[in-house]
Amino acid sequence: MKITTVVPAYKPKYLADLLHALLRQTVRPHQVIFSDDSPEQDFVRLLKSGPLAELASGLDIEVVEGPRRGAFANWRHSLETFGGRTEFFHMLCDDDVMYPSFYERHLQAHAHGNFGVTVSRRWTADEAGQPIRDLPVPASVANGAGSLVSLDASVLFYATCARGTNWLGEVSNALYRADAARLISDPQVGGIGYLGLEDIGSFLCSTLTRPVCYINDHLGFFRTSSGQNSAQHYGRPLKLAFLAYLALSMIGRNAGHLTTEHLNYCLGVIGQGVLRHYAQQEDMQDACTVLRDWMQGVPGAEDRFLQVWQAYSGYPMAG
């Protein structure tokens, strides 16, 4: 079973850590694709010359020029370059790190069933890579028997959207089958987009066709820094994430895996959060207005939210 590591690259600061993590894998990837979205093509330069080039020589690396149209465009470009060339792919963000047994453990998990994606537990670390916190994994999962837990759509939508929480992490701590790439590159189900949460969205929507396998063991860390999107409180990526979470709850309700009561709970959590943080933000006025109406039970507000959400996110794209 072969793996392609796909790196939508932008921040060269952590490239040495990334290469070391790949080289130390007990099962190495078949190939590594860098989509270099940095302004000065730093990854192209660093991977071809100097001490990092010597490190890179231990891996089969392909570097392509990124589209320079934002993070999502680079994620999509990375996956288009991958093109399903191996059975599995790992989308590795350029500042995250996997522990040496990451690929070995994920392949073992995939061998236990027909899973679209396997997701492992991971630490949140500071910029130096020191673990500082865990994700709030439900007790039924964290304390369950065995290290592998099969999660179907009803369980996973309930354990996330119905509770207004994300304990799964993001793409760097997951290994996908090749055909699941569409869940990241085309983030929508039934005309409802989840642009802004392609990570948890791909996990959840994968369960609409087959279960997800959760590996209850820390196999890497998510590095926090002041420059990442999640740290930009008033940035567009975080606003998209708020609203996309509500869109994912609608997808779960429409598929029969959440009740209206579950959706309303999520609406309360997300709506209050949006109003608390963004009520004075000019670009969020339409969203705030429709969320107030929806929370107050105004007829037609849910449909209006979908219209506002599509206009704000630009996804799914018209035509």
Image: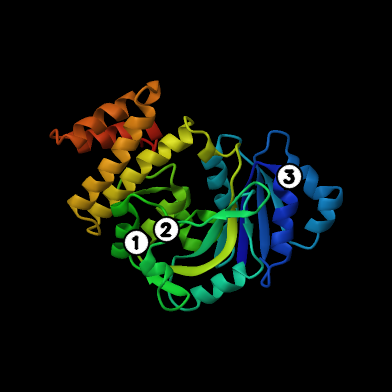
Residue 203's disc number: 2
Asked whether, in this view, residue 168 is left or right of residue 86, the answer is: left
Residue 282 shows in the view: yes
Residue 43's disc number: 3
Residue under circle 1? 156
Q: Is residue 32 above or below residue 197?
A: below
Asked whether, in this view, residue 196 is left or right of residue 78, the answer is: left
Q: Quadrant location of the N terminus?
A: bottom right
Instruction: Point out the residue furthest to the right here.
Output: 50
Q: Nearer the viewer, mark 3 or mark 2?
A: 2
Q: Residue at x 73, y 44 (%)?
A: 43
State which quadrant residue 122 falls in. bottom right
How far from the left and from the top, in percent, is residue 59? 75, 62
Q: CA distance from mark 1 to mark 2?
A: 9 Å
How far from the left and from the top, in percent, is residue 85? 59, 62
- Circle 1 packing at 10 Å, graded few (<14), some (14-19), many (20+), is many
Q: Residue at x 31, y 44 (%)?
A: 246
Q: Are marks 1 and 2 in contact (CB under 8 Å)?
A: yes
Q: Residue at x 67, y 42 (%)?
A: 11
Pick whichever, 314 or 14, lies toward us: 14
